[in-house]
Image (tube, rainbow, N blue to C red):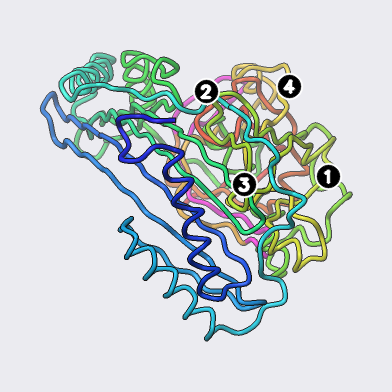
């Protein structure tokens, strides 16, 4: 593939990655892997109708990892000249000679390499001009400001576009690569005055700009989310049901994925050690990983080691079906890689029948969480404590906004006390999940 936005074609960078492997072999390496990547992007920000920033980026790089038996060395460069590539390979080889042997390091197994590179429709460049991007940003911000006269200020609106291309090769004879793109529109505004000021935001991101939410819709949602937080109050410490709106529910799923990921497992720093085949969550929790969704934000035909990705069930009826492993972490655990070197792919959480309002009625009286602060999650014990803001609910109806509170529990208990998962799914990243209702958590005033 050749595209004028990149300095090299896909075939050219594939050849470059293979040339790096030849250099590594000439330097005595028993095995090697290399990745060549190029990226271009543009970002425009406006605030209160005026242009604040116009940024361009054009990056390139090569990284190489060499193995001398069970010794490993790594080096990288942003210079793609032949001389620089030779120097980089030599540096990686020199590093390897001084590293300790690690019986678990090395390339992923040869029989796991992707036989074919699936076409997943990930590349949709957006040739938008700066002037047009500015107009979209202004439209987004103005739509937010128009929501309510109490919106008195803005943190700005942003329109960004980015495209990249990469090629990966290793000594098994595997070479693969493809282009991809990602675009976004976001907006954040401020409402109120003096001591009663609140901010909120909204955004949309997609592989193709045609799949983005409209500028006016993004702005409107940002404005509405900001205004609804005005006149917030504190509440007394209590134990009540807690509803994590969809935008935050993905964080709960992310914490679960972290607990079943190889690095935390082999270091024994996870509260879900030895949980394979065990009940780790309520029976209504089902999580499916699908790396092959067309235009998916976390789709990939192979992982960062060249291992073919495959759709699979991670959690079925609350029972853990599989871990998230690279070849290194899998070897440390005496298991087989799951094709997750570089991270998880599209995680689809099965939804229930209730929309957001239905979840409120199901909850009755309790707390809706719309913002979390801090990083109060202990991966070893599962203890969970976060600063939060949101809304107090009585009889299934939002009564008022709340802030300066802390929500606390243990994630193991939270997963097992999931009461409902809404059908209000947001697609803003690698996890597709609706709002999640937890049966009971401690809510405390700060």
Q: Position of residue 93 (x, y in %)?
A: 49, 76
Q: Relative to residue 321, is residue 71 drawn left or right?
A: left
Q: Relative to residue 13, is residue 289 drawn left or right?
A: right
Q: Is disc 1 surrounded by few (<14), some (14 to 19) or many (20+) residues within 10 Å?
A: some
Q: Which mark is residue 321?
A: 1
Q: What is the distance, in whole Å, between disc 3 and disc 4 at their CAs?
A: 31 Å
Q: What is the distance, in whole Å, between disc 1 and disc 3 at their CAs?
A: 20 Å
Say what secondary structure mark 2 lies in. Answer: strand
Q: What is the distance, in whole Å, between disc 2 and disc 4 at their CAs?
A: 21 Å
Q: Which mark is residue 141?
A: none
- Return the residue found at the far right: 277
Q: What is the distance, in whole Å, between disc 4 and disc 1 at their CAs?
A: 21 Å
Say what secondary structure mark 1 lies in. Answer: loop
Q: Nearer the viewer, mark 2 or mark 3?
A: 3
The earlier-in-sequence mark between 2 and 4 is: 4
Q: Read off the residue under disc 4.
A: 352
In the image, which residues are magenta? 379-401
Q: Position of residue 228 (x, y in %)?
A: 39, 24
């Amino acid at each position: 593939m050749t595209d004028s936005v990149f300095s090299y074609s896909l075939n050219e960078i594939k050849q470059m990655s293979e040339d790096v492997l030849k250099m590594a072999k000439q330097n005595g390496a028993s095995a090697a892997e290399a990745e060549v990547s190029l990226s271009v992007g543009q970002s425009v920000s406006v605030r209160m109708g005026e242009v604040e920033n116009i940024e361009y980026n054009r990056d390139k790089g090569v990284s190489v990892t060499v193995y001398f038996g069970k010794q490993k060395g790594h080096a990288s460069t942003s210079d793609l000249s032949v001389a620089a590539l030779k120097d980089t390979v030599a540096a990686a080889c020199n590093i390897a000679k001084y590293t300790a042997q690690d019986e678990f390091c090395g390339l992923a197994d040869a029989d796991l390499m992707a036989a074919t590179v699936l076409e997943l429709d990930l590349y949709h460049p957006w040739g938008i001009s700066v002037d047009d991007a500015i107009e979209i940003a202004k439209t987004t911000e103005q739509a937010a400001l128009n929501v309510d006269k109490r919106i008195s200020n803005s943190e700005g609106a942003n329109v960004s576009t980015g495209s990249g291309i990469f090629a990966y090769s290793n000594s098994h004879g595997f070479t693969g690569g493809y282009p991809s793109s990602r675009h976004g529109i976001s907006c954040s505004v401020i409402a109120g005055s003096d001591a009663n000021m609140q901010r909120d935001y909204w955004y949309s991101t997609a592989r193709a700009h045609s799949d983005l939410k409209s500028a006016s819709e993004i702005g409107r949602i940002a404005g509405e989310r900001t205004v609804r937080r005005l006149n917030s109050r504190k509440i007394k410490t209590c134990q009540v049901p807690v509803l994590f709106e969809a935008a935050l529910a993905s964080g709960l799923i992310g914490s679960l994925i972290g607990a079943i990921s190889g690095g935390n497992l082999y270091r024994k720093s996870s509260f879900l050690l030895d949980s394979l085949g065990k009940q780790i969550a309520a029976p209504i929790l089902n999580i499916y990983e699908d790396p092959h969704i067309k235009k998916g934000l976390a789709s990939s035909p192979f992982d960062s080691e060249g291992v073919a990705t495959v759709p699979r069930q991670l959690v079925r009826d609350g029972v853990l079906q599989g871990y998230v492993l690279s070849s290194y972490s899998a070897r440390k655990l005496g298991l087989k890689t799951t094709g997750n070197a570089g991270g998880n792919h599209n995680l689809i959480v099965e939804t229930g029948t209730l929309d957001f309002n239905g979840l409120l009625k199901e909850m009755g009286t309790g707390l809706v969480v719309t913002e979390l602060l801090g990083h109060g999650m202990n991966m070893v014990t599962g203890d969970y404590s976060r600063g939060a803001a949101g809304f107090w609910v009585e009889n299934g109806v939002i009564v008022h906004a709340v802030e300066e509170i802390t929500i606390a529990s243990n994630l193991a208990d939270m997963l097992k006390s999931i009461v409902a998962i809404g059908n209000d799914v947001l697609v803003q990243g690698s996890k597709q999940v609706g709002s999640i209702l937890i049966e009971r958590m401690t809510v405390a005033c700060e």
